[in-house]
Amino acid sequence: MRNANPSVVCIGAGPAGLTAAYLLSKEGVLVTVLEQDPNHVGGISKTATYRGFAFDIGGHRFFSKSAEIEHLWTELLGDDFLVRPRKSRIYYRGQLFDYPIRVFDALSKLGIAEAMRCVLSYLNTKIFPERTPRTFEQWVTNQFGRRLFDIFFKTYTEKVWGMKCSEISADWAAQRIKGLSLSKAIWHAIFPQRGDGPRKKLTKTLVNRFRYPRRGPGMLWEAATDRIRENGGQVLLGQRVESLRCNSLKGCGWQGAAFLLRSRHLEYAHAGTGPSGPSHACSRSVERGRRIAISRFSCGGANCQGPQRVRR
């Protein structure tokens, strides 16, 4: 097996693991990525094929306030990264509602009475908020009011993630819906934000266009995999890590389903450094990989990882 004793091992070939591995490989670091999926890279940002058709695992869109991340995407895919207008809608009571919320669209479909209930519920929450929200339910209720939470957020979130909103951490909610509330949604419905404005001032949840790989999000991570291999690294599929053995002098070894791999440093899918710490030469690459990989690296600012449970 080529590169049998890499300097860095990344566990997981999702967006964070592949990004860290790619940046490290560009710096000449020997890197190996271990992925338990036998066929695909990309984690939940992969693109699967069935009978000649390509399917995304969930909806993804690519937008970042970081120019560094945008440049990296372009570096990997070039002209295969397309710009597309956004069209998002919520199906509720037999009707499709525009999202982000458009005032006249919502009023005409909810009706004046229901819309007023939503506004009054929001005002009540502003007067009597949850001071220290710990759950997704509490955080979203603070931002949108109880009635809108029950109408739109509760059922959708629990259906997608298979967890009760009372069990999901408020920190995760803040990451995915950062900078958005009912008042801001109404403001932007009346005064839409310009898509060509300064990126750092844009609310990501409200962007009206985004970039998208020509053949789905998996195309980006397949390109990253190819570049890692071209740079002398390895991306091994069907390799489930079963145990970790660490020695401060000899480095670390990972017992996989088929072999024992030894390395000096460990990169989890979150791109953290290994227990023994990186050498100075490797440190800058690891730090750069970590910085990009954990900056909510996927698809429109939506974190590629699932929700974290509330810590009791």
Image (cartoon, grey):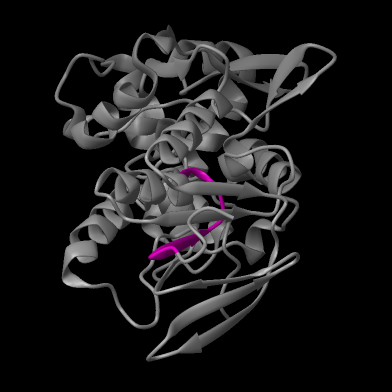
Q: Is residue 279 left or right of residue 204?
A: left
Comparing 115 with 5, the one in front is 5
Query: Is 59 above or below relative to 121?
Result: above
Write the residue at 67% across / 37% down.
Answer: 40
Comparing 249 with 201, the one in front is 249
Span of residues in magenta: 6-15
Provide residue 4's location: percent of width, then percent of height.
52, 62
Write the residue at 47% across / 11% down.
Answer: 104
When asked about the image quadrant of residue 12, the answer is bottom right
Q: Please count the marks in the image.
A: 0
Quadrant where the N terminus sits is bottom right
Q: Residue furthest right?
A: 51
Whether residue 62 is visible here, answered yes or no, is yes
Query: Is 95 above or below relative to 309?
Result: above
When asked about the image quadrant of residue 194, the answer is top left
Quadrant where the C terminus sits is bottom right
Write the residue at 40% across / 18% down.
Answer: 211
Q: Is residue 80 left or right of residue 219?
A: left
